[in-house]
Amino acid sequence: MTQQVSAHHLSRLAYLYVRQSTLQQVLENTESTARQYALRERALALGWSQERIVVIDQDLGHSGASTADRLGFQRLVAEVGLGQVGLVLGLEVSRLARNSSDWHQLLEICALTRTLILDEEGLYDPAAFNDRLLLGLKGTMSEAELFILRARLQGGILNKARRGALKLTLPIGFVYTETDVVVLDPDLQVQASIREVFRSFAHTGSAFTTVRHFRQQHLLFPRRLRRGAHQGELVWAEIEHHDVLRLLHHPAYAGAYVYGRSRTTKTADGKLHIQDVPRANWVALVREAHVGYISWEDFERERVTACFEQPSVCSQAFFPTTRGTCALAGFDPLWLLRRTDDGALSPAQRAAYHPRLSVPEPKHCPGEYSLSTHSWARSGSSRWGGAPGAHDPRSPRLDLGSTGGSHPASR
């Protein structure tokens, strides 16, 4: 199994690859790092001189699950492919790669360029069948070990989260005490700002109007920096629409502990995508877990009201058919767009076109609904309380000629 080192191998460089998965391991697992550097002695014993041993340690603190962020491993593969390397050294297979595709790519290139591989247990020639088989099995076991470690870690996290005991990053307005108890932010200005958001939304029923209220009154909204040199510091800035919606949809403001509201997936290009998860699929939702700013009943009512400002919900509820002339069949669009002076839809409108949100009743609609963009837009309002099929004489009619047919009420 052991391949004798030849002059052909010694004429090329020996590359020692050193890696730790996290910066914490770099700081704490110093013995493991020292063992990896000590492999230079094995290369010296095989005949390489000190100056012909290249150490690649720029991947310290990077996971071996992928080569996306491992510039050191990419450099190693490139040098092997160019025929510059006679020996690749790694303490174990898991240091080089924990992904089968990356590992077998390295094996294939080493076999083509007649490059040897050395770990703590022996010396291998990837061009030899038995050595290649053993290296392949080692790579498979290394990848399986990573999945097992992840499963154990994830299982412990989920079990702790279901009890409401997993410590999470808190939204603005909450802090942990020294004993990890969740309490309201001791800064009274922060508390007052958050309470004003809920008070304004309860009065207007519109996140857009709440933002306008803050800006008209020159009120700022607090944020805590999540990363960088000033992580944890409190800053004040103008409130945005997404700030209001974030408060309205986060159960923590009703005193609930929640875990699993979103999931992160990775695509083939290595990019991460965050997706919202339906409430029925949340991992944990523990009510009355800590102090809150509003009651659970108020939270549920305001969350439903806020749905009117989310096109992904409102467009499907109001327009089950979104293409062709059928999108306008069966109702008068002008009747849907009518609002009262304060922006409210009539109970008949809510019941007819959004029955799921009829209890509790949304107080207000943020503006007019655009048939072309399927989104709400702020605009002036005129009081009107008509029924389906009737038109407000003070408002212009929609031009339905572009739909390819006449209005159903006129047939």
Image: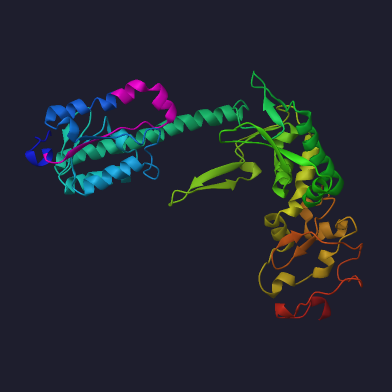
Q: Is residue 19 visible?
A: yes
Give the quarter of the image for residue 383: bottom right
Instruction: Tell me: residue 328, above or below residue 377.
Output: below
Query: Which residue is outermost to the front?
Result: 51
- Identify which residue is drawn at 86% across, 71% down: 389
Residue at point 60% right, 27% down? 167
The residue lying furthest to the top in this view is 179
Locate residue 60, reporting x and y percent: 37, 33
The correct choice, above or below, for 333 with respect to 231 in the image is below
Would residue 105 be found to the left or right of residue 267 on screen?
left
Q: Is residue 209 left or right of residue 110?
A: right
**Quadrant location of residue 380?**
bottom right
Q: Position of residue 233 (x, y in %)?
A: 64, 32
The N terminus, quarter of image: top left
Measured along the vertical axis of the image, is residue 322 above or below residue 298?
A: below
Whether residue 23 is in magenta: the answer is yes
Residue 217 or 276: which is nearer the viewer? 217
Residue nearer the viewer, 256 or 387: 256
- Does residue 389 appear to the left or right of 86 in the view shown? right
Quarter of the image with the C terminus is: bottom right
Going 21% across and 49% down the picture, which residue do you hit?
A: 82
Please say whether residue 87 is visible from this viewpoint: no
Where in the figure is residue 216, as x and y percent of width and height? 83, 48
Residue 27, horizontal then vertical, whole percent: 41, 24
| Camera-nearest residue between 51 and 213 | 51
Q: Is residue 120 magenta?
A: no
Q: How is the image coloured?
A: rainbow
Magenta stretch in the rendered image: 11-34
Q: Is residue 65 left or right of residue 381?
A: left
Residue at (84, 44) in percent of width and height: 200
- Where is residue 35, by image quadrant? top left
